[in-house]
Image: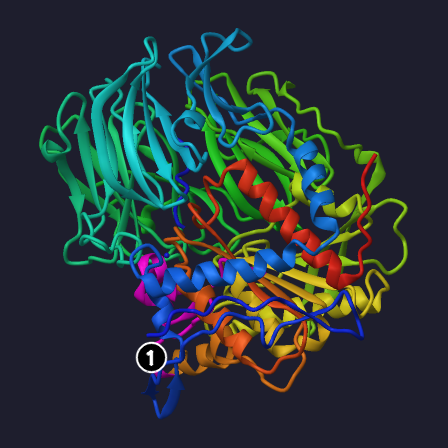
């Protein structure tokens, strides 16, 4: 088995007036009289002696069921659409993006029973299609085409997993971008969808087949109260076994912790079929408990070998009773250890070291072909190293260049594995790796209307406010040498590393002469646990300082000019953008916060928000409250100061970061005296936090974002021949 990936949650609005044009600067639109009217409510709550106003709390309502909220959304979109239609670069970007996206894209193949399963998109298909080949380089055939599932293309194929013999396929359906999944089963030979159906799985199905193909293990939540499925907190996660041919109501409960309702559980079956491994977490921190169930025991009695949520314990695989783990116990950059579970006292204290901690950060591990294949991050770039099972080094995997490698999945007896490689100027390519010979060969290389020789990629290092050295990638057309309009992106949280990757949408920005800068700020996992810890909880201001310092560096070094810098981030990165705009509105020309966490005093009340206390802290605790209140984007908008142009984005079916965050933030910035530049929101319909978004919606949104950023950074947009 592979190392398990884990988690990581009244007046009707008036019709907008026509946009007003400033006669002194005809292309600048002023908005104080054009924004939709947003009703204010007198909500003030005392928290730890502080009077906290929340005048737009009613915008937390569900857009699908509350008419006033829906009318407000429609009015905001009318204003935003009217403004975006005036931008001359919008159509140019959209046309070019359609060309840049129109190329074949393949996913990593999975081999089971001699069949190879993989996703494929011909280019402009809204959703990737699942294909299968009966041999590695044989003719493929379509198994599942989600493009036929809905008229708007917003129903996606999410997780999928073939049975051990390759005859059945478990797959999940994601509708309209929601995190909820519907799980079904397909007969691979006939293409027939079986009657089996599982509901109320979320975030990840976390499932795995029994080796005999009799059914599969999965994790789910209780069915939420009617009408609350997109906002209710998720608790009481449980692992079940579904036997093929039976109703979900008959599924066997395998593991639950009712005494700890906030805990989440994800399961996987070992390659030898004997053990079910259940990995338990409670928040977003990579700290896990590990429980084993011997599947040869009819009682399926759980045995917890890692009882405390104190360290990361990622199960890589087992040889008999010896289990291999990647762990950060006594190793903040992680190491590989083994635990013999035949020892009745087996646990963290009986672990023996196999591969010690390195200078680089261990970011991925698998056991394939009798080898340990370990991926490391070296200054946010991938290196892949091989080891024998006793820990002796066994060479490296040669990569095509400096970039990001991912994959290396498979089972312990497999002689081959597959990996994807990508970089800013290297379209994602799939490689087959022969474990025995060390030979790497291309399996699927995309043909993109893009010449990597025309672009320069460099990594720079700059100093943050406290002197910390922070890496940043700078990407631009090779002939762009002077100050140029620049898009600065970062994330900065949840141990998430931002690595080099090809993006068709970013190419459209770069080929117009724009610069892309990606800062690897604290809060991420680029340098291990210490880097993460330095950017969370009471250290969160370091994240904002790092991002602000990145912008100052780009200007100081002549990469961009004072009025040429746009910033972008999504989710936690949307929080980042909202916070730094409040703190340094003078530094940026434009800001693009996407699906951001904007109300830091109420984030833990909806869907997945309760998990985020690991990074943000508890609003109900005074020390945490004071930190959160100091940077919360919604609560710190500064009237009387000119702000950059802002185009916030969210979606009506985002049940990860509920759209109320962005709705309230938008109402606040539109009500404040923060200058004449536009402060708008773009609200997508039938879309969620990002995954499953149709290609046509991705292209339309990117064209809007780039045209907006171009207008306010001075980027001249011309047709590409």
Q: Nearer the viewer, residue 309 or 463?
A: 463
List x then y, in percent, for residue 574: 54, 62
Please determine whether, in this image, residue 212 is positioned above or below residue 421: above
Q: Nearer the viewer, residue 148 or 360?
A: 148
Label 1 packing within 10 angstroms: few (<14), some (14-19), many (20+): few
List x then y, in percent, for residue 718: 82, 45
Residue at 77% over, 46% down: 510
Q: Image check: 491 left or right of 286?
A: right
Q: Secondary structure at mark 1?
A: loop
List x then y, in percent, for residue 197: 22, 29
Please determine whether, in this image, residue 653 is positioned above or below residue 100: below
Query: What residue does disc 1 label?
Result: 621
Please determine whether, in this image, residue 99 is positioned above or below residue 639: above
Q: Nearer the viewer, residue 67 or 460?
A: 67
Is residue 612 magenta-colored? Answer: yes
Quadrant of the snapshot with the C terminus: top right
Quadrant of the snapshot with the N terminus: top left
Q: Which residues are magenta?
A: 593-622
List x then y, in percent, for residue 570: 54, 56
Q: Does the rendering let one see residue 529?
A: no
Q: Does the rendering let one see residue 135?
A: yes
Residue at 42% over, 10% down: 114
Is residue 324 magenta-colored? Answer: no
């Amino acid at each position: 088995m592979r190392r398990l990936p884990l988690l990581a949650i009244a007046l009707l609005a008036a019709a907008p007036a026509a946009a007003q044009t400033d006669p002194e600067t005809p292309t600048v639109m002023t908005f104080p009289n054009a924004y939709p009217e947003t009703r204010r409510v007198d909500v003030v709550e005392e928290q730890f002696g502080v009077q906290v106003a929340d005048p737009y709390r009613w915008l937390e309502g569900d857009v699908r069921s509350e008419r006033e909220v829906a009318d407000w959304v429609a009015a905001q979109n009318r204003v935003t659409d009217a403004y975006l239609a005036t931008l001359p670069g919008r159509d140019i970007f959209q046309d070019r993006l359609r060309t840049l996206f129109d190329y074949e894209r393949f996913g990593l193949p999975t081999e089971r029973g001699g069949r190879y399963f993989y996703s494929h998109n011909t280019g402009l298909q809204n959703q990737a299609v699942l294909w299968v080949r009966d041999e590695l380089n044989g003719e493929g055939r379509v198994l599942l085409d989600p493009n036929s599932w809905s008229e708007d293309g917003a129903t996606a194929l999410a997780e999928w997993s073939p049975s051990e013999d390759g005859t059945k396929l478990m797959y999940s359906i994601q509708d309209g971008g929601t995190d909820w999944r519907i799980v079904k089963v397909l007969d691979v030979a006939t293409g027939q969808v079986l009657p089996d159906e599982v509901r109320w799985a979320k975030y990840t199905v976390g499932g795995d087949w029994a080796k005999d193909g009799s059914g599969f293990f999965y994790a789910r939540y209780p069915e939420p109260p009617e009408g609350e499925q997109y906002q209710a907190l998720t608790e009481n996660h449980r692992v079940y076994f579904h036997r093929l041919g039976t109703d979900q109501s008959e599924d066997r409960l395998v593991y639950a912790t009712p005494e700890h309702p906030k805990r989440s559980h994800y399961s996987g079956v070992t390659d030898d079929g004997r053990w079910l491994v259940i990995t338990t977490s409670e928040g977003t921190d990579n700290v896990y408990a590990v429980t084993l169930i011997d599947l040869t025991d009819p009682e399926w009695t759980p045995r917890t070998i890692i009882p405390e949520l104190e360290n990361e314990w990622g199960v890589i695989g087992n040889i008999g009773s010896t289990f291999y783990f990647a762990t950060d116990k006594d190793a903040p950059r992680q190491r590989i250890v083994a635990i013999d579970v035949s020892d009745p006292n087996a646990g963290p204290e009986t672990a023996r070291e196999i591969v010690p901690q390195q200078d680089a950060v261990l970011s991925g591990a698998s056991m394939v072909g009798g080898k340990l294949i370990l991926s490391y991050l070296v200054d946010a770039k991938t290196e892949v190293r091989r080891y024998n099972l006793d820990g002796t080094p066994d060479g490296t995997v040669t990569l095509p260049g400096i970039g990001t490698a991912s994959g290396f999945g498979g089972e312990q007896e497999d002689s081959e594995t597959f990996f994807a490689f990508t970089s800013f100027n290297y379209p994602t390519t799939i490689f087959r790796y022969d474990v025995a010979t060390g030979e790497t060969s291309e399996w699927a290389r995309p043909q993109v209307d893009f010449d990597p020789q025309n672009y320069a990629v460099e990594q720079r290092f700059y100093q943050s406010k406290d002197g910390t050295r922070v890496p940043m990638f700078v990407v631009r057309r090779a002939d762009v040498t002077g100050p140029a309009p620049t898009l600065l992106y970062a994330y900065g949280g949840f141990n998430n590393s931002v690595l080099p990757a090809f993006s068709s949408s970013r190419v459209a920005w770069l080929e117009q002469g724009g610069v892309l800068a990606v800062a690897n700020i604290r809060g991420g996992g680029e340098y291990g646990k210490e880097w993460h810890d330095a950017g969370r909880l009471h250290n969160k201001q370091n994240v904002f300082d790092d991002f602000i310092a990145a912008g100052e560096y780009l200007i100081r070094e002549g990469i961009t000019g004072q009025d040429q810098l746009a910033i972008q981030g999504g989710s936690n990165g949307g929080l980042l953008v909202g916070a730094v705009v409040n703190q340094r509105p003078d530094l940026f020309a434009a800001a693009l916060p996407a699906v951001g966490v904007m109300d830091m005093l109420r984030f833990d009340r909806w869907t997945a928000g309760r998990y985020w206390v690991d990074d943000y802290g508890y609003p109900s605790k005074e020390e945490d409250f004071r930190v959160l209140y100091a940077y919360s984007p919604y609560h710190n908008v500064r009237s009387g100061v000119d702000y950059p142009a802002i185009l916030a984005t969210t979606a009506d079916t985002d049940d990860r970061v509920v759209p109320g965050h962005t709705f309230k933030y938008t109402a606040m910035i539109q009500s404040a005296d923060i200058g004449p530049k536009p402060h708008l929101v773009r609200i997508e319909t039938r879309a969620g936090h990002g995954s499953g978004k149709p290609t046509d919606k991705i292209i339309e949104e990117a064209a809007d974002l780039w045209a907006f950023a171009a207008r306010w950074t001075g980027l001249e947009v011309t047709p590409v021949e």
